[in-house]
Image (cartoon, helix red, strand yellow):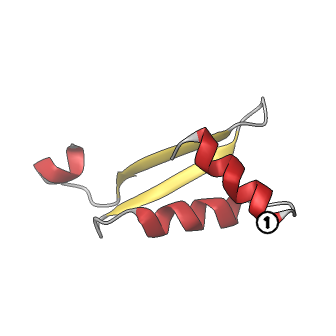
Amino acid sequence: MSEALARVTLDVKKEPVAVRRMLDSLSQMVSIAECDVFGYLGLDNELVVLVTTAVSHPSALQVN
C-alpha cells in the first residue's frame, strides 16, 4: 500500500486509526487465502507491514 493511499484514508476518517484496524483493512486486500498481513508500529512512528504466507510449505505463487 502506498503512503499516499494511507494518507487519503486518514484524511477521510478525520480521526485516529488504530494499527490493528489498518492491518485488518490491508489483510482484506490480500487475495491469496494462505497469506496474511502482520505488522507493528515502528520506533519512528512508521507502520511496518509484512505480507507473508501462513502455511509451512508455501507454493511458488505465494512466494512471488
Q: Residue furthest right?
A: 15
Q: Position of residue 37 (x, y in %)?
A: 47, 57
Vertical relation: 29 (above or below) 11: below
- Expressed as whole percent of the image width and height from the top left, the position of residue 53 reads 32, 55
Taking the view exactly as shown, the residue that stands out farthest to the top is 44
Question: On the image, which quarter does residue 46 sit in?
Answer: top right
Q: Which residue is mark 1?
A: 13
Residue at x 65%, y 60% (from the top left corner): 22
Q: 34 or 4, which is in the foreground?
A: 4
- x and y percentages locating residue 31 in the rendered image: 31, 66
24 or 53, which is in the foreground?
A: 24
The outermost residue toward the left is 60
| Quadrant housing the C terminus | top left
Relative to 8, residue 32 above or below? below
Lateral position of residue 11 relative to residue 22, left or right: right
Three-letter code for the amino acid on which mark 1 is drawn: Lys
Q: Is residue 59 left or right of residue 45?
A: left
Residue 18: quadrant of the picture: bottom right
Q: Position of residue 4 (x, y in %)?
A: 62, 42
Q: How many marks?
A: 1
* Secondary structure type for disc 1: helix
Tell whether 38 sits left or right of 31. Answer: right
**Which residue is depicted at the point 38% across and 62% down?**
30
